[in-house]
């Protein structure tokens, strides 16, 4: 089985500042990793995914994440945030070839302030 | 853009009533998931289907919940009888699995359920 830990439940940041949202996972098998974003009253939207290959993954809205196998991490970063990035961010993991069954973290609320 | 469509978006009903939530997955997707989101538990997987067959419903209370896929364009989640503790946002997601390749899930906008 897999598990995901998002240590920060809330991250406040000023507009145009950089941000990093942390995600650590646990698994005894190879994994695929995902970041989803949820805006108020909406479903989850895929930001980016790591399946294989380059460990630096670029996604939509200027976000990127780096897969670090030795540290079992998949932290999400953006060099300069905008007010519109205010949302909840979920890290998720699935077993590679495991049929797409996702295990989600508890989410991190990113609040961008002026 | 293709979307997962869920109906209704909001449902308020009294305890004991039957609730049916519907989901139209993205055309061509062969896997459908049902999730429940609450403040206390976060996102929980209730059940999922592959090619309309149920693969795992271990996350679902069996005594009152049921999930079906009558055809490839419709998935349903029913609660009978409903209880206040079922109040949550229920999400449907669909994806495509081909061999060992997993494709990301696409989520609908959810059904916000309130049981009084």
Image: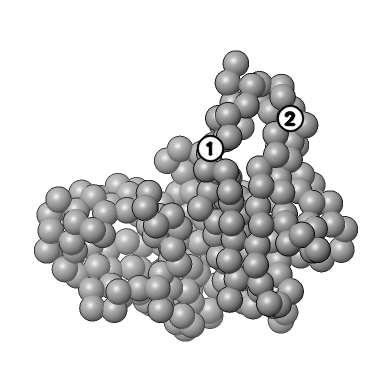
Query: Where in the figure is residue B1, as x and y percent of width and height?
Result: 61, 49
Co-location on one chain, circles 1 and 2: yes
Q: Which mark is residue B65?
A: none
What residue did someone put label 2 on? A18
Q: Residue at x 12, y 54 (%)?
A: B14
Q: Is residue B91 visible?
A: no
Q: Residue A104 or B23: which is nearer the viewer?
A: A104
Count every numbered label the image shows and give the total. 2
Q: Tell me where residue A99 sits by quadrant.
A: bottom right
Mark 2 belongs to which subunit?
A
Q: Residue at x 71, y 45 (%)?
A: A76
Element assignment for label 1: strand
Q: Residue at x 71, y 22 (%)?
A: A16
Q: Residue A17 or B100: which is nearer the viewer?
A: A17
Q: Residue at x 24, y 67 (%)?
A: B79
What residue did someone put label 1 on? A10
Query: Where in the figure is residue A42, as x and y percent of width and height?
Result: 46, 43
Q: For the residues marked 1 and 2, what is the alpha-carbon distance in whole angstroms?
A: 15 Å
Q: Coloring scheme of the render? A: one colour
The residue sitting at the right extreme is: A54
Q: Tell me where residue A8 sits by quadrant.
A: top right
Q: Residue B98 or B57: which is nearer the viewer?
A: B57
Q: With respect to residue A42, does A18 lie above or below?
A: above
| Quadrant placement of the N terminus of chain A | bottom right
Badge 2 density bin: few <14, some 14–19, many ≥20, Cα 10 Å: few
Badge 1 density bin: few <14, some 14–19, many ≥20, Cα 10 Å: some
Q: Is residue B50 visible?
A: yes
Query: Where in the figure is residue A81, as x and y percent of width and height?
Result: 69, 28
Q: With respect to residue A93, does A17 lie above or below?
A: above
Q: With respect to residue B4, does A58 lie above or below?
A: above
The residue sitting at the top extreme is: A114
């Amino acid at each position: 089985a897999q598990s995901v830990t998002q240590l920060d439940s809330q991250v406040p940041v000023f507009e145009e500042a950089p941000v990093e949202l942390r995600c650590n996972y646990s698994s005894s098998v190879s994994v695929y990793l995902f970041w989803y974003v949820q805006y108020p009253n909406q479903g989850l939207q895929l930001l980016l995914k790591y399946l294989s290959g380059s460990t630096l993954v670029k996604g939509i809205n200027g976000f990127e994440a780096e897969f670090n196998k030795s540290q079992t991490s998949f932290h999400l970063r953006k060099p300069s945030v905008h007010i519109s990035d205010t949302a909840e961010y979920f890290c998720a993991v699935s077993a590679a070839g495991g049929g797409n069954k996702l295990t989600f973290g508890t989410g991190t609320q990113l609040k961008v302030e002026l | 853009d293709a979307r997962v469509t869920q109906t209704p978006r909001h449902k308020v009903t009294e305890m004991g009533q039957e609730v049916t939530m519907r989901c139209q997955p993205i055309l061509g997707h062969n896997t459908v998931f049902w999730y429940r989101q609450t403040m206390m538990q976060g996102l929980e997987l209730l059940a999922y289907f592959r090619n309309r067959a149920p693969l795992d419903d271990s996350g679902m209370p069996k005594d009152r919940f049921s999930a079906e896929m009558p055809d490839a364009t419709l998935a349903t989640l029913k609660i009978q009888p409903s209880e206040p503790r079922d109040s949550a946002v229920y999400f449907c997601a669909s994806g495509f699995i081909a061999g060992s390749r997993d494709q990301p899930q696409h989520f609908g906008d959810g059904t916000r359920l309130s049981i009084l």
